[in-house]
Amino acid sequence: MTEFLVRHFVKEYTEIEKVSVRTAYGVLASVVGIFCNVLLFAVKWTIGYLLHSISVMADAFNNLSDAGSSVIGLVGVKMASKPADQDHPFGHGRIEYIAALIVAFLVMEVGFTFLKDAVGKIRDPEELRFQAVSVVILILSVGVKLWMCFFNRKLGRRIDSKVMLATSADALGDVVTTTATIASVLFFRITGVNIDGIVGLGVSLVVMWAGIGIAKDTLEPLIGEAVEPEEYARIKEFVEGYEGVLGSHDLIVHNYGPGRNMASIHAEVPNDVEIETSHEIIDRIERDAFRMLGVFLVIHMDPVETKDVHVMQVHSQVEQIVKALDPAVSIHDFRMINGEEQVNLIFDMEIPYEYDAKRQDELKTTLIKLLQITDPRYECVITAERSYVASAKE
């Protein structure tokens, strides 16, 4: 069904790097969400009214809030697709995150409302009525929500959309809450004990937790999150794949909405090559990165020694000492100023985020002592910095 909908309603559905195609995916997901959730709301509200069940009605209004969320998502996707202008040179892509954040607060508000209702039902329970057809309809609604979960997850992974993945997680939460509602009705049928208020309380907590999860997922790119290791490797390998580039480091990626990234990176080039030649290579990489990766890339050139054997040996020696001292630390931008009585070693040292100032100082002091054991003339100028790459997730 998912592929059928994509092929019939998304033109050029394989060209997912295009903003227009991503927008079409977002519109499709929103329209499907609106249709399914409104249908589920109507059915569940009717059942809840007939059964006098707060848990069923809470579940129904949760579906209505999901439909409202889909409407907001639809508006957000359309607004996010607006092209760049003078006031917003990087486009309007972050509106999609803002829309998702609004959705998150709506979900939490619905959960809180039914939390109060559930507490009232626990204090003053109302009579429940059992109807087998109602249970069957609720079971069918679980199937619909489960399909919506897989539908949004598949599309979200295809176009790398945090909003769709959050919607998928929300749909999975709905599966849990509706299943709990069915269990409360069946429990009443079997035992005659009304646990509707307790189950409604659990449903409301799950709904609020889903809202908090969506808010967290959408706040991260708005605040500014580290680049994922996979994206880091993709851009780094792309840059280093060009002849004339010896290595790269200090990659920073700024996200301006799904599929809208600006990045900067330092590329190491031989110091004995004409600057015009290296500059031409860098210009070509920047153009190709935008055309092939969809990334607006700015590259800073770092000249490195490739002919002086002594400098290269010292560089390798420093790297080995650093790795033996702490495998989590690395160096780059190495320069050496050789003199008769003093040799200056100048380099940047990349350290993990969890290292505090005291540990940084201890690391620097120990490294300098180890280097001076090798050659007492060494004087080090070390700049400590942290990586902009997220920790790899297991």
Image (cartoon, rainbow, N blue to C red):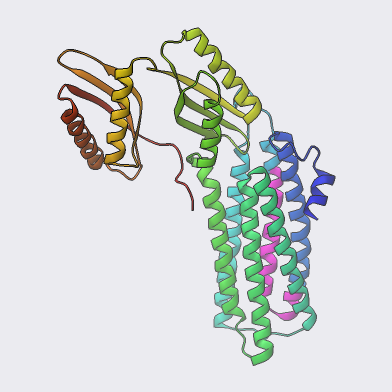
The quarter of the picture where residue 171 lies is: bottom right
Quarter of image, res 200: bottom right
Occupied quadrant, residue 377: top left
Residue 201 percent coordinates (x, y): 56, 73
Q: Is residue 364 left or right of residue 273?
A: left
Pick whichever, 5 or 104, lies toward us. Answer: 5
Q: Is residue 67 above or below residue 13?
A: below
- The magenta stretch spans residue 74: yes
Percent x, y of residue 245: 49, 21
User: Can the viewer see residue 44?
Assistant: yes
Is-magenta flag for residue 108?
no
Image x and y of residue 334, in percent = 33, 23
Q: Is 4 on the left or on the right of 352, as rendered?
A: right
Main secondary structure type of the part rendered in magenta? helix
Magenta stretch bounds? 47-75
Camera sees residue 55: no
* Residue at the (62%, 59%) spot, across then down: 170
* Quadrant of the image containing the N terminus: bottom right
Please state if 93 lies on the left or on the right of 225 as rendered: right
